[in-house]
Image (cartoon, rainbow, N blue to C red):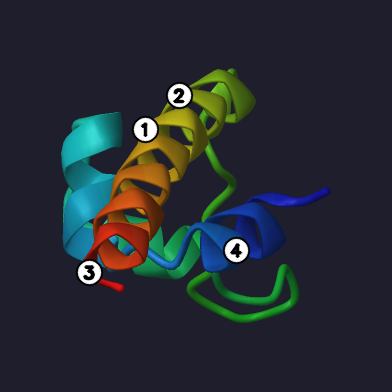
Amino acid sequence: MDFRTATNLLGLPATELAKAFSLQPQTIRQMRLAPDAASYRSPPAGWEKVVVNLARERGRELDRLVKELENIR
């Protein structure tokens, strides 16, 4: 899986991804472009580990949402 696909699946905006990577949002947007785009930038080494941590955090948030909504019934 590539950076663009992984970060798209997370559903987080570039501003939140930028915080996690300690980068500017515009840099994240450039890393999410197609590799043949003129302003494409390669993602940093080890990006997978950061995305795994974000995915775990997002999963916990979604689990909490499910539990809260199920308790409403």
Label 3, label 2: how many angstroms apart (C-alpha)?
29 Å
Mark 3 or 1, which is nearer the eye? 3
Q: Position of residue 58 (x, y in %)?
A: 39, 44
Q: Is residue 69 left or right of residue 8?
A: left
* Residue in the picture at 21% in, 41% down: 23
- Name the kind of residue labelled 2 in the image: Asn
> Residue 53: which numbered mark, if any?
2
In this rendering, which labeled residue sits more in front, label 1 or label 2? 1
Q: Is residue 19 left or right of residue 40?
A: left
Q: Which residue is mark 3?
A: 72
- The quarter in which the C terminus is drawn is bottom left
**Residue shown at 30%/33% (left/top)?**
21
Q: Amino acid at mark 3?
A: Ile
Gap in Å between the C-alphas at discs 2 and 4? 14 Å
Say if 49 sits above or below 43 in the image.
above
The residue wearing badge 1 is: 57
* Above or below: residue 25 compared with residue 36: above
| Residue 26 percent coordinates (x, y) | 24, 66
